[in-house]
Image (cartoon, coloured by chain):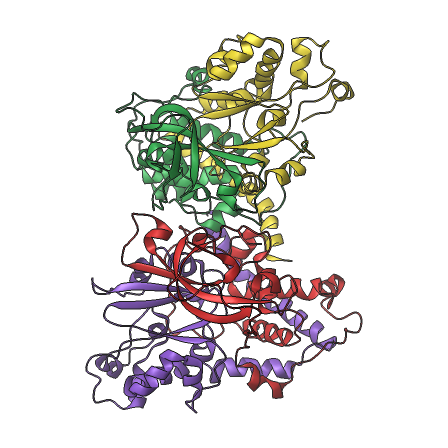
Chain colours: A red, B green, C yellow, D purple
Amino acid sequence: MSNTIHDMGGMHGFGPVEPEPDEPVFHEPWEGRVMAMQRAMGYTQLWTIDGGRASMEVLPPVAYLAASYYQRWFLGLEKRVTAHGLVGADEIKAGKSLRPGRRLNRKLTAADVPNTTRRGNFERPAPAPAKFKTGDKVQTRNINPTTHTRLPRYARGKLGTVEAVRGCHVYPDTAALGDHEHAEWLYTVVFTGRELWGEEADPSITVSIEAFEPYLGAA
Amino acid sequence: MSNTIHDMGGMHGFGPVEPEPDEPVFHEPWEGRVMAMQRAMGYTQLWTIDGGRASMEVLPPVAYLAASYYQRWFLGLEKRVTAHGLVGADEIKAGKSLRPGRRLNRKLTAADVPNTTRRGNFERPAPAPAKFKTGDKVQTRNINPTTHTRLPRYARGKLGTVEAVRGCHVYPDTAALGDHEHAEWLYTVVFTGRELWGEEADPSITVSIEAFEPYLGAA
Amino acid sequence: MTADDHHVHDHGSELSDMQLRVRALETILTEKGYIDPAALDAIVEACETQIGPHNGARVVARAWVDPDFKRRLLEDATKAANSLGHVSPVGAHLIALENTPELHNLVVCTLCSCYPWEVLGLPPVWYKSAPYRSRAVIDPKGVLADFGLKLPEQTKVRIWDSTAETRFLVLPMRPEGSAELSEEQLAELVTRDSMVGTGLPKSPADAKRGASR
Amino acid sequence: MTADDHHVHDHGSELSDMQLRVRALETILTEKGYIDPAALDAIVEACETQIGPHNGARVVARAWVDPDFKRRLLEDATKAANSLGHVSPVGAHLIALENTPELHNLVVCTLCSCYPWEVLGLPPVWYKSAPYRSRAVIDPKGVLADFGLKLPEQTKVRIWDSTAETRFLVLPMRPEGSAELSEEQLAELVTRDSMVGTGLPKSPADAKRGASR
């Protein structure tokens, strides 16, 4: 869902940022396993990164905030493997497999791992020319879908400027719903701090988002 | 603070509303005591209702969401009596009074209670004529103060219409900071659902807020 | 167990904690001379017995039978409600919102829990809950559906967000088939939810079957 | 005990729960033939040893010493980074952001935790935390202050919210007094935080004293 607690840009009250000196890569061994399971299951191509994000965004807000980062990943992964019928709720409860698994397209082996430390490419051939070009004034749309989107609340209905055209990429809003190939043009759109936060905002600040074409209208 | 979790209008993900059949006035005896303590301490006039609200809004977001309603009131009250120096942190810890109390302006007795079941009047003489009249188009300001305000995020920077002028009332934004008398004109401002939530919103919906004059500019 | 279950689970065990903490604070405030426990008793008793939706119901029933009262109620609800001797005193800035076949009013406080308690009593838990506060302004019809309420196609919905010290009382439409009822009988049909906008008054037939809320 | 303490307290006790739950899920996924534990081992090992900010530091150091590389980096950071044999392979759409005396770049992902992990490793906890995600876009100077960083008055701040699959690497300014250093020595000055925008590179003097982060 779009307006859930994960969309926290501009919220107050979470306290100071607390950097941890000499932070380890993982604080507990299980964190590494969760991260690795996430990658391995992502390799099956049953969902995209957007489906993964969406499954964490629907966690109840208290759970989302109270969970640590990898707890959230774990809860999202558990939700996804059950939602996709890969694992039964009874198996989760039992803590073991109760029946054979489904056949999947591919399975990550240790030999494949070096290739998966490189991020996937979500760029796709453009179905149409880009509507906007660098320097264009645009207004972000005010959308409030009950499904996944990557247009943050703080940047909706705001006037901005296209600073770069980034190519045509898989569109998260539809990818989260299962269409893993539909692509849209992606732009870097920059806003003044005052446009986002009002006339009292610090005038020396600008903020950009990476905005897909359906998020934008001509200004 | 203004953009804290308490400002939840328009958020998704909290699940369905769950009415409770034959709900009692209080679910636990302590809830009634908290409510009554809140009223009795409010009667001392050390803070206004705005100060009370502000003290709950600064609860950490997880605490705010995880706490029940009267737990939140309790946490806010505890914060307020200590912040105002009425009770020491050591006394809270000890669970008993460790030194005599301060002298307060007034103290609520059982005999006063019938008068306190009527809400206070926050209307004040107008320092200046109202800037807007019924029918005026207005635009709410985009403010994001780190202090208390009653202009919700979802209604900032939006075009609306003044539907009623409600008189001149104590201004919450300054009252929460200790100025208990500064007053501002109050208006009912109505917005279309589409103005608030975008072109895909249900066209049969309108939403109004009660907006103080400093929240508004001419449109 | 999910992180969510975990919190639900905590909640139960916190109750007794809360009882102890609340009692301790009451003791401290009493010992320091700030509060009088007898005053607290009186407040709790007033909330449990005196104030409540029966007051609002009387206001609504009178408006249904007395067009002049209804006019005065819509003009100044505080004054009109206070003119009924049997309703507990109502403070400033109560505003009555008339439902019609064209317009349904729904009251919420997105920022906290503002509620016309002099006429409706203390707000129910759902009114103060995150689901109601978050959704009423963006998905009012979904919220009404949670209450089992589906409005006619042509009815528009107006949401009133109680962001200041004004308070709103919905004046629901008088139910069909209630022409023969007395003012007192009509008051019995007026539910709390119908005065918030999340319900409709009972029909005379429902009332006979003893439906509540 | 406040409700907040309560949760902090829970958190600790949940860790062992988590260990059990994670192990159970790994067992199930393995038994069902979906994953290979050896692949998980290899991923964890790569994260702990291979990928990390040392890769980004090499890119930055090269840009400091080689104007042509810097030009190519700002044009297409993926291609430029991959042209350095000693940096682990970088996927599509890495974008380098050049800091100047007039402009300081700061990278955040308000919606989740997008981060250029091929060049910086997995993100630190603070990058994924609510305080950073919520405040970076509305109070960036307050966030920088949390890191002990105060920019010159005339420096503007540009925040990059990573809302898509593009990834951002800040190219910090080369520190004063580093003219004599080799590319390898320069790489030692480049901190993770300086490539996110929440810090500056170490000065050669700091580096000698062994300051970290």
Residue C4 in the image: state x and y as whole percent. 60, 53
Residue B80 pos. (x, y %): 37, 38
Viewport quadrant of the C terminus of chain B: top left
Left or right relative to B30: residue A204: left
* A179 to the left or right of C69: right
Residue D45 x, y percent position in the rendering:
53, 83
Q: Which of B19 and A171 lies nearest the eye of the viewer?
A: A171
Q: Kindly indicate the quadrant of the structure image that contains residue A15.
A: bottom left
Q: Going by the image, does D153 lie left or right of B21?
A: left
In this rendering, does residue B32 appear at all?
yes
Q: Nearer the viewer, residue C212 or D155?
A: D155
The quadrant of the picture occupied by the N terminus of chain B is top left
On the question of residue B9 being in view, the answer is no
In this rendering, would C24 be left or right of A2? left
Q: Quadrant of residue D68?
A: bottom left
Q: At 67% across and 38% down in the image, what residue appears?
A: C145
Residue plotted at (65% across, 84% down): A109
